[in-house]
Image: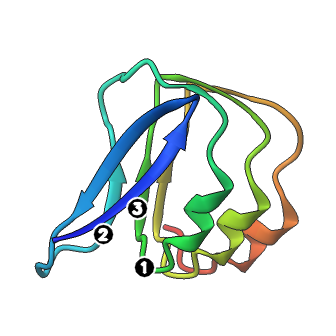
Amino acid sequence: VATSVFDLASKHHTLVFGHCSLPPRLSFTTPQFFTGTLPTTLGNLKNLMEIHVPNNALNGTLPSELGRLTALKDVGLQSNVFTGTIPRELGNLGNIW
């Protein structure tokens, strides 16, 4: 089992991606009460295909590093409190549904 660790609002959350036929996902479909910003290190998870962290209190701007996630197909960031503009680097994500 491969493990990726990232820091979100000074709370450590461990994401575990198993070696199976399912695509790698970061998915919290029920509110987890996350606060703070999305970490720029998410851009290092090159095989990430889904990000779902809706209905939380994530804030700040979307990191431009998300534009490196060229395998990304599905994103759910609604009902957070992001500010600013959408980074132009996200235009590199041609696989989003």
Q: In this view, does 64 lie above or below 9?
A: below
Report x, y in % for residue 28: 32, 38
Q: Is residue 44 above or below residue 38?
A: below
Q: Do the residues labelled 2 and 1 touch (CB within 8 Å)?
A: yes
Name the front one of labels 3 and 1. Answer: 1
Q: Do the residues labelled 3 and 2 touch (CB within 8 Å)?
A: yes
Report x, y in % for residue 30: 30, 27
Of callouts 2 and 1, the N-terminal one: 2
* Residue type beneath disc 2: Pro
The span from disc 3 to disc 1 (Cα, nearest Å) is: 9 Å
Q: In this view, does 58 lie above or below 62?
A: above
For label 3, the SS is strand
Q: In this view, does 26 lie above or below 80?
A: below
The span from disc 2 to disc 1 (Cα, nearest Å) is: 7 Å
Report the residue marked by disc 2: 24
Q: Is residue 70 left or right of residue 71?
A: right
Count residues near mark 3 (Cα–Cα under 10 Å), then give few for <14, some for 14-19, many for 20+.
Answer: some
- Quadrant of the image occupied by residue 22: bottom left
Report the residue marked by disc 1: 47
Report the residue marked by disc 3: 50
Count residues near mark 2 (Cα–Cα under 10 Å), then give few for <14, some for 14-19, many for 20+.
Answer: many
The span from disc 3 to disc 2 (Cα, nearest Å) is: 7 Å
Q: Residue at image x 40%, y 61%?
A: 50
